[in-house]
Amino acid sequence: MTHDTLPGAPVPFPGEPSVSREIAREFGLTDAEWERVVFFLGRDPTYAELGVFSVMWSEHCSYKSSRLHLARLPTEGAQVVQGPGENAGAVDIGDGFCAVFKMESHNHPSYIEPYQGAATGVGGILRDVFTMGARPVASLNSLRFGRPDHPKTPRLLAGVVAGIGGYGNCIGVPTVGGEVQFDASYDGNILVNAFTVGIAATDGLFFGTAEGEGNPVLYVGARTGRDGIHGATMASAEFDDDSDKKLPTVQVGDPFMEKLLLEACLEIFAADCLVGVQDMGAAGLTSSSVEMAARSGSGIELDLDMIPRRARGLSPYEMLLSESQERMLMVAKAGREHEVLELCEKWDLEAAVIGRVTGSGRFVCKATPGYDPLVSDPSERAAQLVVDIPIGALADEAPKYDRPQAEPAPEPLEPAPPTDVDCADALREMVGSPNLGSRQWIWRQYDHVVRDGTVFRPGEADAAVVRVFCEKEGETIEKFLAVSVDCNGRHVLLDPRQGAAMAVAECARNIACSGGKPLGTTDCLNFGSPETPTTMWRFARAIDGLAEACTALDVPIVSGNVSLYNETDGKPILPTPTVAVVGQLEDPSHRVPSGFRVPGDVIAHLGVPSRGALGGSEYWVSRTGRVGGAPVGIDLDAEVRLQRALLALAKARLLSSAHDVSDGGFGVCVAEACIANGLGCRVSLPGDGDVPPAARLFSEEPTRVVVSFAEADRDAVAAVCAEHGVPLAPIGEVAGDHVDIEDALRVSVADLAARHLAALDAIVS
């Protein structure tokens, strides 16, 4: 390509539709935003330029309704290597290595086309991690579906799970855990949140920068097609009855191509011939180019004629907005682009020099009318200017809104669910319900042991634990990571601040129960329309809750994603600020499973005594058909003490098991601990004896854990708990083959296990 900047302003490309305010509205821009576009350009945009503005100013790319609030999140800490603003965040794990991780949503695409939507969500989050120079070592997911008996739920559940497994299994990264919930609010808008963690040398991280005027810009990976065009703007709009017609906006993934791209990228990184690298994710070539230039304060010029393509007749608009998968944008050091090209050829990848870094501070693209490399003679190229936009207008100066907020009106007081029930029957029902039953049907479709690093398989502990191998100066160093993902939208609905704080606390508590120290957090904030004041009120309050919990527990947020407009026909989903926490075990002997293991072990309740509060619980919903009750709240100081005590107990190797009391309450917690290894228990019911047994059994009050330990260690366990100011209440022992809870219930473990394992059968059969 010539490096001569074409004079004059861009002109309409042959065949492009004419641009107008009305077309801008169809692209998701408001009239005020249209005027802002014209102001920045000093003229009307071309069709390609309008497309660029529409995706870069979408909620998905610009965070225009959330940036103001996200600034309140804690992002720094002694352990933070890289915070928000890059492809992924990173925390220090010692010996010159860091854990690199992020979580993102692929909600709308997964509803439209479940398999490819979920598969490309996995592919996208993997690229975010290895773009940083990290080798991915584990993935998790957080999924939400509508009512189990909704006619679309079986197809959506089966398709999403198959897509996650199909992509992750092929690329060779284990899917080691996750969570799934069902609720009517997700009938028309499911959630698919994907998480990946990788390992990199701390001094070997790569960033999305485009520095050095004249440095070559390279396209690497799969060829460009028409799939996924306007995926970013589709993800920034609510659904309606015509949502199924949006199939062309869904990307198509190729995990085998991604595997080649992963290995090629890591080899290119090792050659030290790059300035920067960026995944072509949402908004494709446009967002990757603009973001790289914006971070560096530079400009970027692209020759669209040089883009590898797999479809004929692609226009500049289509090439710029395509979200074809398995693609990277790289900026090479001057004169070393040939090394990138040679390594790509080695790995059988497409690669081409398509542009250069400039000092103009502008995003400039040119293309030749009628030219198509699939059919045209390269000598006939005569490029014209098709895009010329200030980088700032697309990045820092993109719209930022302080949306109106309004606290929702109090819900009318309705009767609480009855508690004078047969507790045995209630427990049978709870452990076999879709929201609390076994996820075995799901995880059996995932390869959770590939690479031979999985320490705890799904269902064996509160958090997944993986062993990773770090190479340093010819020495192999073992590291052990613990990862967990969680959110309970019911609690967030009742009190967004407390509910969001509880999500962080539960994730970190899962890490601590498994023997790890929580280090850092990523989030995926799923809410309805930001144009609805009550939604924005809940969003802002949830941010405050996340900030408070992350600060108290010292787990800064280092990366994340916001997904808004999750609603259909004006009906929003439950507010679902999903969080994932990454932690570390100093020694593999510190790991603690969740199930009872040794007959005769003491069983004890650690943490805040239960008041029997049922607000937001699965019990409440299952008995009334609605989310109700007073929010239970959380004492973060007590939570900190509990997690420190759990970590100390794990390091002292005093625990046989630890399982946190969360969804389903104490009763489900104990039942799951028994089901794990087919062992029974005889325990008393903790809490205030004046509170009905059903309330104490099924309350989901936080900051509680059920542990087991050897009788010989009773005093040592008590001493650790006393040192940390954590209430310890021995309540019984591991014994027999029944769940025997004094004055409440006695149920066969085998009966509970059968119901637990069959929980999803009615949906998927």
Image: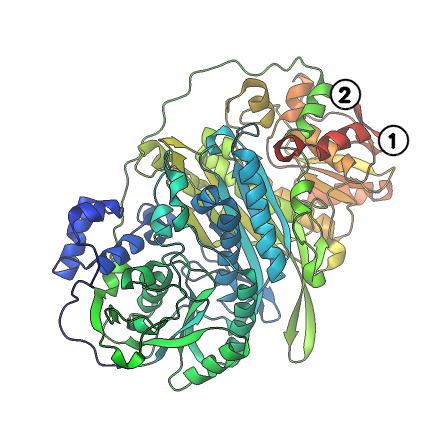
Q: Is residue 291 left or right of residue 706?
A: left
Disc 2, SS? strand
Q: Quadrant of the N terminus?
A: bottom left
Pick the residue in front: 162 or 738. Answer: 162
Specify few, some or many for label 1: CA neighbours under 10 Å numbering under 14, 14-19, or 20 or more. Answer: some
Say if residue 174 shows up in the picture. yes
Q: Position of residue 535 (x, y in %)?
A: 36, 35
Q: Amino acid at mark 1?
A: Gly
Say if residue 555 shows up in the picture. no
Residue pictured at 70% horizontal, 34% vertical: 669
Q: Amino acid at mark 2?
A: Leu
Q: Position of residue 756 (x, y in %)?
A: 71, 32
Q: Which residue is mark 2?
A: 745
Q: Position of residue 151 (x, y in %)?
A: 53, 30
Q: Which residue is mark 1?
A: 736
Q: Is residue 636 left or right of residue 678?
A: left
The image's colour scheme reads: rainbow
**Rendered position, 293 above or below 22:** below
Disc 1, SS? loop
Q: Quadrant of residue 153?
A: top right
Residue pictured at 46% horizontal, 80% vertical: 341
Pick the residue in front: 64 or 687. Answer: 64
Specify few, some or many for label 2: CA neighbours under 10 Å numbering under 14, 14-19, or 20 or more. Answer: some
Q: Position of residue 744 (x, y in %)?
A: 75, 19
